[in-house]
Image (spheres, coloured by chain):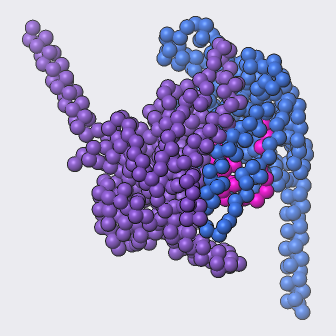
Chain colours: A purple, B blue
Amino acid sequence: MAIKACVSAALAALACLSAQQAAAAETCPPLRWMTLGTAGGPVPTPDRSEPANLLTADDFSALVDAGDGTVVQLARRGLDLTRISAVFISHHHMDHTGGLPAVIGLRWMNNMPGQLTIYGPPGTREIVDGIIATMGPQSRVGFGLGLGQKSTPPSDSVRVVEMRSGDQVSSGNVKITAVENSHYDESVSGKADRAISLSYRFQLGSRSITYSGDTGPSAAFEKLATGTDLLVSEVIDLDPILASIRKTRPDMPEAVFQSMSKHLSTHHITPVDLGSLAAKANVSRLVLTHFAIPPAPLTNSEARLREGISRSYSGPVDLAIDLQSFDVACK
Amino acid sequence: MAIKACVSAALAALACLSAQQAAAAETCPPLRWMTLGTAGGPVPTPDRSEPANLLTADDFSALVDAGDGTVVQLARRGLDLTRISAVFISHHHMDHTGGLPAVIGLRWMNNMPGQLTIYGPPGTREIVDGIIATMGPQSRVGFGLGLGQKSTPPSDSVRVVEMRSGDQVSSGNVKITAVENSHYDESVSGKADRAISLSYRFQLGSRSITYSGDTGPSAAFEKLATGTDLLVSEVIDLDPILASIRKTRPDMPEAVFQSMSKHLSTHHITPVDLGSLAAKANVSRLVLTHFAIPPAPLTNSEARLREGISRSYSGPVDLAIDLQSFDVACK
């Protein structure tokens, strides 16, 4: 009887502990960001995978940009696509979208349940339609099991939600806001269906993570980032890149050089501009990714990046590596 | 005068050496294979990248299959896409094609010269057309240089050559032969436009490399491999995979299990069958890749793989890792 009572008490204690853990999980669900690929720019690099990220917010997991190698990077952390219900694409440059076909295709090929939602700026539907078209031959082939098995049509495995500046969507407790940033030149704007490059804010209760995508200084992006706990941003180490262009392309006409210089400083963000933006937006923590740097180790750029940011911003600054994760704890 | 004569003699010696090196390079141009990704099957793995390979034959460089992460894997070896003029796709399963959009897209985005030729079985054109369609939004956006620059249309950056069993193509001194293997089930065959899975042989003078793609035992593949210097082949560690299915899916109906067992042993190749094929084809060297193994380190399978192969084949057998390269020297 005593033993029984002890066992009962022990079980009750375990149940109590378990309930406490559940309550803790309920009051502080996870809000995390993983940098799957931290390279910047269209030229692939030896030590950093193409731009891709994983957001985890409560029970919602989404990829944010999906460059070449996204699925493999996930696998390197023991993660597969079953947990991922959405992809947010910041803009339509191939370094940010090159891995999307494999995400959609391997998810379909592995017969994963549910529908993947692809969010992105106008044009996203056209991209996903192209990806679905690439899957035609494979969906007709099947997988050789000889059971007369019929694959789900690839088009049923995915849906597209195109977002414009100011649009909000939500999934469970997570609210996602998109704004147009300054990555795209005016020369491609001004039309109803013009190209848009987006920054995203992921809000879970009072906590948030804001992601720059590719952008230069931008009032909309600064406003979006206001009071955010974690700002994940691109950055460009401009001066050595311009010096490298001068050196390797002495034949470049001055007008072209000036145009390139303007592009790199207004469509991408320098440490000084980023520090200023992070300070004005009162950002709690800054994580750098998508490093647009000369073809050399990041160490060569780190002091310049930190010095530029620190002119205005005094919060913590991390230089992300691939497969690193960043947690936003409850306050 | 003496000094001048010495300098002349030294220069002549250098020129002689240089000419000798050139002659050596001419008489023995490189024939090499690099395993960019050695994973097997549709489920991405933490320690091996998706199926992809790089063939170098004289001055011809081609990708052979292009799974997710191909471009990043190339970059990890300091290689970019400028040197690559062709891609050979073995068959249309997404683990072998998931990286092709990034190959085509990043090559185009980086404005690399020349046209990339995509060889593959019927259906390849449909896949490439889908990829080109995904590039529509990006080709309209441009790259923000504000120079009124107009990108080359993505469709101009690539051409497609569909191959059927027995087809040969050549590039310079390299002759490539494709044969249909046994990867695809009869249930998908019998039509004029039926799905085909190909094996390839790359011949440079008297030297050759033969690549299985995905296949089970196949007379056509065996014939293709006859006398080849280097056979790069998939392999399946069948018994533990079947045991794992029995264990994790005790609910699986026997008919489904038998069908899966047949698929795995006739559409993929066991060590015993591969050893037999390599012996009959008189292959000089065997390199294993595309490891279909249980979700555990390859070390757990290595003894079984080697034992099965060695029942018939006594030549050297290497178990490839990602980014390994294999040289076929001149005889």
Look at the image and tell me in which quarter the N terminus of chain A lies: top left
Residue A106 placement (x, y as % from top left): 58, 33
Query: Residue furthest toward the bottom?
Result: B1
Residue A5 placement (x, y as % from top left): 10, 13
Residue B328: quadrant of the picture: top right
Residue located at (19% from left, 31% from top) = A20
Q: State the extent of the magenta-drawn residues as a range.
A: B99-120
Left-right relation of B71 to B186? left
Residue A256 placement (x, y as % from top left): 65, 75
Left-right relation of A61 to A137? left
Left-right relation of A124 to A4? right
Query: Residue furthest toward the front?
Result: A192
Residue B149 visible in the shown view: yes
Residue located at (55% from left, 72% from top) = A262
Residue B325 visible in the shown view: no
Q: Nearer the viewer, residue A53 or A86?
A: A86
Placement of B41 over or under A53, stated as above or below: above
Left-right relation of A279 to A61? left
Residue B38: quadrant of the picture: top right
Q: How many dots with numbers?
A: 0
Placement of B325 over or under A267, stated as above or below: above
Q: Nearer the viewer, residue A61 or B236?
A: A61
Residue located at (61% from left, 43% from top) = A126
Q: Nearer the viewer, residue B54 or A22?
A: A22
Residue A299 placement (x, y as % from top left): 47, 65
Residue located at (46% from left, 69% from top) = A270
Residue A250 among magenta residues? no
